[in-house]
Amino acid sequence: MKWDLIESDLVLSDNWIKVRRDKCRMPDGKIVDPYYVLERPDYCVIFPITTDRKVVLVRQYRQGAGVVSLELPGGLFEPGESDPESVARRELVEETGYGKGKFRLIGTLFPNPAVQNNTAYCYLAEDVTITGEQNLDHNEDIEILLTPIEQLQEMLTRTEIKHAIHLGVMLMALNELKTRE
């Protein structure tokens, strides 16, 4: 079932993306050439809940789709980072000013395993509190929304959340919280 890699060439390399052209042999002997793979950094997505049981959401513009998107906080591993929880804690504080709390890995997802090689680490962060101000990257403009869990569930029903990975994390976190009730 697994393909054999015959040859691989890097056709684009930048700070945050690499594009690789692979030549592969399928189990039945067919050759697939070219097959393009996007090499992207791993990242974390955090489902943060405040001490008064509100979910910290972010709203930001997404150039790829050309839309303003309602999402969970999260972000990429920086070069040299390897601990997903540290990345999750850093990103939550940077994007929202919220921190501390109890962080727990609730799963990992492959954003698009057909053409990408990265992993999304999914965290539930409970009892987060405001610890400071946002510390945004130069290309970020993020609005913070505190949303009661019940309202978030209604938003999911109305498909107000369009980011597929974040939707998956929300469903995983809500299920996790429900099983503990």
Image (spheres, rainbow, N blue to C red):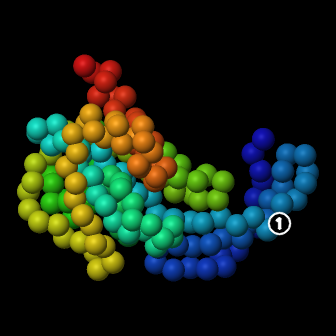
Query: Count the marks: how many?
Result: 1
Residue 105 vs 7, above or below: the answer is above
Image side of residue 1 versus residue 132, left or right: right
* Residue 102 rendering spot, x and y as whole percentages: 18, 39
Say which of 50 and 37 sits in front.
50
Q: Is residue 106 visible to the viewer in this orientation of the structure? A: no
Image side of residue 59 versus residue 62, left or right: left
* Residue 84 rendering spot, x and y as whole percentages: 34, 52
Quadrant that contains the N terminus: top right
User: Mark 1 highlights which residue?
Assistant: 33
Q: Which quadrant holds residue 127?
A: top left
Q: Residue at x 31, y 40 (%)?
A: 152
Residue 37 vs 160, above or below: the answer is below
Q: Residues within 10 Å of mark 1 (few under 14, many from 20)?
A: few
* Residue 154 rendering spot, x and y as whole percentages: 35, 37
Say which of 116 and 145 sits in front.
145
Quadrant that contains the C terminus: top left
Look at label 1 and name its amino acid. Answer: Asp
Say which of 6 and 58 sits in front.
58
Q: Is residue 69 visible to the viewer in this orientation of the structure? A: yes
Q: Residue at x 34, y 36 (%)?
A: 153
Q: Residue at x 75, y 64 (%)?
A: 35
Image side of residue 128 versus residue 68, left or right: left
Q: Which quadrant holds residue 34?
A: bottom right
SS for tag 1? strand
Q: Residue at x 24, y 64 (%)?
A: 143
Residue 108 vs 64, above or below: the answer is above
Farthest residue to the right: give it. 29
